[in-house]
Image: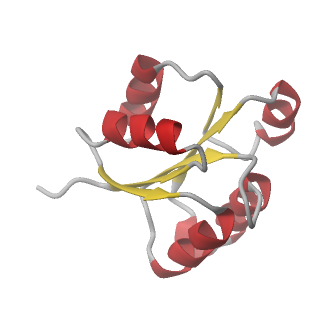
Amino acid sequence: MTKPLAFVVEDDPQLSRIFTITLSEAFETEAITDGTQAMMRLSEVVPHLVVLDINLPGVSGAKILHSIRADARLAATRVILATASPRQADELQDKADIVLLKPVSISQLRDFANRLK
């Protein structure tokens, strides 16, 4: 059985690596480091899950989230927001499936991702 695809959209290389390794047990993972690249990949592929940072170079995570929610192809894509900003988390909470405040607990990320699987 093939694993569902998860995008890790995070510009911090260390966090990106940690999130990717955390999800790799249950998901096929693809690390994406900027918003422009994320938008391009989302136009080509429909991931099951997106772990999304809000503050990204290129296109912001908030714009990516709005784009995902507005695209019928991505209607089933689940989104976990990972942000250090409680204000941004509150503003986007109704659009995301789950919002995690950084620093993100690895076990918490794994548990939530598996629930969304």
Q: Quadrant of the N terminus?
A: bottom left
Say whether residue 116 is visible. no
The x and y percentages for residue 39 are 62, 72
Quarter of the rendering containing residue 86: top right
Q: Please give left or right for residue 111 compared with residue 33 in the image.
A: left
Q: Residue at x 65, y 45 (%)?
A: 53
Total tally of numbered discs in the picture: 0
Say whether residue 77 is visible. yes
Quarter of the rendering containing residue 81: top right
Q: Residue at x 74, y 67 (%)?
A: 58
Q: Residue at x 43, y 22 (%)?
A: 106
The x and y percentages for residue 18 are 41, 34
Q: Residue at x 75, y 47 (%)?
A: 55
- Relative height, residue 15 to residue 57 (above, below): above
Q: Nearer the viewer, residue 40 or 115?
A: 40
Q: Nearer the viewer, residue 19 or 99?
A: 19
Identity of the residue furthest to the front in this view: 13
Q: Please give left or right for residue 61 compared with residue 86 in the image.
A: left
